[in-house]
Amino acid sequence: MSDLVTIRPLAAADADAALAVINEAARWYREFLPPGEYHEPEMTPGGYHGEAARMTWYGAFRATALVGVMALEYVKDVALLRHAYVLPGRQRDGVGLRLLAHLEGEVRDVRRVVIGTYVGNYKARSALEKAGYRASDDPAGVLRAYFTIPEDRFRTSLTYEKTLEP
């Protein structure tokens, strides 16, 4: 039940648990990413710490167990919600939507929120649409303007956007 979930910024001591969530949740990418674009692990410790240098990681906890992560990054005139992962056994119980709503509440000084995902990630796309996000009119332009991602990921990604109320 998602009502038992607490959300807080992640500390350095949470890095191993966050990586475990990310890498476990990302295994399902095998279902839609071409073999040359699927990477295991999805994120390494160095990658996680590199991302932490420019964004704030948040975690969703059930009791003391980390069950989901998401990060908030500001780039130019937008807030990017990045790296949204929920453990497979905790998906579809509202954890991801609770994280999304929490991070929207943390956004400051900008109104436009952008999220990137894979074209084939129907789970994320459905959740984003339920949360009021709409596919960007020019996803390639948005990806180039706000994201630094490998070219293989660029070809298989799109973006969603939402304007927050002031």
Image: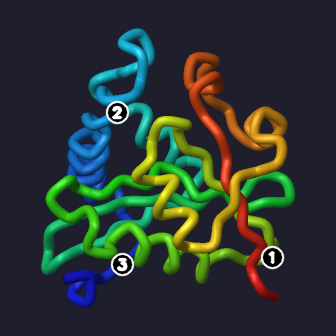
Q: Amino acid at mark 1?
A: Asp
Q: Secondary structure at mark 3?
A: strand
Whether residue 128 is situated above or below residue 15 in the rendered picture: below
Mark 2 or mark 1, which is nearer to you? Answer: 2
Find residue 18 and report its horizontal and vertical position in percent: 29, 52
Q: Amino acid at mark 2?
A: Tyr
Residue lying farthest to the top in this orientation:
36
Do the residues bearing badges 2 and 1 touch, measured as CB atoms within 8 Å?
Answer: no
Mark 2 or mark 3, which is nearer to you? Answer: 2
Find residue 58 and report its horizontal and vertical position in percent: 42, 66
Give the labeled residue for mark 2.
Answer: 29
Give the labeled residue for mark 3.
Answer: 7
Q: Secondary structure at mark 1?
A: loop
Whether residue 141 is situated above or below residue 95 in the rendered picture: above
User: Mark 2 or mark 3, which has the lower sequence index?
Assistant: 3
Name the residue at 30% across, 83% down: 6
Name the residue at 46% across, 53% down: 124
> What color scheme is it?
rainbow
Whether residue 80 is situated above or below residue 98 in the rendered picture: above
Choose between 68 and 155: the one closer to the eye.
Answer: 155
Choose between 12 and 64: the one closer to the eye.
Answer: 64
User: Seen in the image, is 125 located left or right of residue 33?
Assistant: right
- Which of the 4 image quadrants contains residue 111? bottom right
- Numbered circle sitting on residue 161: none
Give the labeled residue for mark 1.
Answer: 109
Choose between 50 and 28: the one closer to the eye.
Answer: 28
